[in-house]
Every structure is written in structure tokens, then in C-alpha cells.
Image: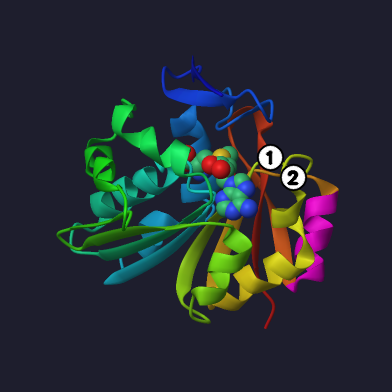
Amino acid sequence: MLRKITLADGTQTFLNEELQVCYHSQAGVITEAMEKYVVPCKIPELAKCSELRLLDIGFGLGYHAAMAIHQALEHNPQCAITVVGLEKDRKILQHIAGMPFPIPFYTQFKRLVPPTFTFQEKKVHVQVLLGDARKRVKELSAEHFDAVFFDPFPPEKTPELWEVPFLQEVRRVMKKEAVLATYSCAPAVRERLAGAGFFWDETKGERGRRGTMAGKWG
Ligand SMILES: C[S@@+](CC[C@H](N)C(=O)[O-])C[C@H]1O[C@@H](n2cnc3c(N)ncnc32)[C@H](O)[C@@H]1O
């Protein structure tokens, strides 16, 4: 069961009552998206190039992806943006249509419907690959993405997405200079990132909220 809740900044998300986990942090989606993902992955800077490819792991309601697109287009309206989302829960995608997220581009996300879960709006292409991310990531080309938003539920809820073999697959699809960003600052997560061949660094938001960014060695 999903229960709708309102966060500190007025944005709405869900509590997954079965897993006892919330889809977004109490600080609010805008703060979370910017501090944990858009800024660490340098989306505004990347958008200055003609093309930006983002992999969004744990697509959920697509809020972070929408924020990334919004920021990228603000900095370069001509940028060709591709977002690939990995999401295993069809039900959460179905809730997108009813969510009032305050980013104008988010209205386009209501087009993410079966069977393709894809839309193209001018130079922005968004596709969600439905299914277990561990399987679907194998379909993606090597060294393809400029940035990765890594936002599964916490390791105690979905341990499979925090294991080294999956992280190695994610690393495989990242370009040499690409950055992966995640909300987690847990030492065990950072150890696994290192074990999968990443170097990592801390990210810090307002009020000291910590996360992790990671890149490829060499
Ligand atoms: C914290 S929520 C993501 C919120 C999302 N980033 C957003 O902006 O709305 C984590 C998501 O990971 C998805 N998930 C959990 N296990 C998964 C798996 N094995 N493969 C793909 N997605 C998974 C959940 O269904 C959930 O939507």
C-alpha cells in the first residue's frame, strides 16, 4: 500500500507501507534533488554540451529526473537530453499522472504510460525500462552515460541494488568522466563503491546533509 504524504517543502510523495520506507526525504523533493543529485552530477555544466545522457536508477515518480531536465534546459535550451530510468514497480509509475510536482516539465512525465513508458518532447527523450534494474542494466551500452542518479531504497530494504556486481554493471555503462551520485553516506556503501572500482567523495548540502558522489578510476 502507498500512502501519500506531504514533505517540508510542500512536495508530495508516498510512504511504502509494506516496506516501511518513504520515496523521498523529509527535507522535500526539491532540496533532495538538487543537493543529492543535480549539483553533485554537475547537470548545469553538462548541459552546456550539445548532448546529456542521464541514467536514473530507482526512477520512482521521476521527480529527480524532472528536476535534472528542468535545470539542464534552464542552462541550455538546445541541449539534447536522454534519460533512461530503471524501475521495477509499475504501480509507482502509474501514480505519476496524479502527482502535482511544481516543475513545469513534469507534466510531460504523464506520458510515461504502458506499453512503452517513453516520450519525446522536442530534444528531450525519456524512457523507463521496467523490471529489475540488475537485469535491465545489462541491456545498456558501455560508456554511454554522463551522469547516474543512484536512488534505490536503502540497503536494508533492497540490498540487491547495493551489491558490488550491480555497481560494477553501473560503472560499465558510465563514460570515463561520468559521476554517480547517491543520497547514502554509509561507510558500507562507500566500501562497496570502492570494491566496484569507483573512487568516492562526500557531498554536503544545507544543514550538513551528507551524500556520496563516485567516479571511475583511470
Ligand atoms: C527512493 S525510490 C526512488 C525515487 C525516485 N528517484 C524519484 O525521484 O521519484 C526507490 C525506487 O527504487 C525502485 N526499486 C526497488 N528495487 C528495485 C529493483 N530491483 N530494480 C529497479 N527498481 C527498484 C522502487 O520501486 C522505488 O521506486
Residue type at tag 2:
Cys
Q: Which residues are magenta?
A: 188-197
**Which residue is located at x 32 percent, y 50 percent?**
114
Above or below: residue 146 compared with residue 85? below
**Which residue is located at x 68 percent, y 39 percent?**
210
Q: Which mark is residue 47?
A: none
Above or below: residue 2 compared with residue 83? above
Say which of 133 and 9 sits in front: 133
Q: Quadrant of the C terminus?
A: bottom right
Q: Quadrant of the N terminus?
A: top right
149 to the left or right of 171: left
94 to the left or right of 15: left
- Tell me, yes or no, if residue 90 can be seen here: yes
44 to the left or right of 208: left
Q: Residues within 10 Å of mark 2 (few under 14, many from 20)?
A: some
Q: Residue 23 in the image: x percent, y percent? A: 56, 32
Secondary structure mostly seen in magenta is helix
Quarter of the figure with residue 201: bottom right
Whether pointer 1 and pointer 2 mark residues with C-beta atoms closer than 8 Å, the reply is: yes
Cα–Cα span, label 1 and label 2: 6 Å
Q: Which mark is residue 210?
A: 1
Indicate the secondary structure of the residue bearing disc 1.
Answer: strand
Q: Is residue 190 magenta?
A: yes
Say which of 59 and 216 sits in front: 59
- Tell me, yes or no, if residue 34 can be seen here: no
Q: Residue 86 in the image: x percent, y percent? A: 50, 56
**Which residue is located at x 79 percent, y 45 percent?**
186
Say which of 3 and 69 sits in front: 3
> Image quadrant of ligand 1?
top right
Indicate the secondary structure of the residue bearing disc 2.
Answer: loop
Residue position for label 2: 185
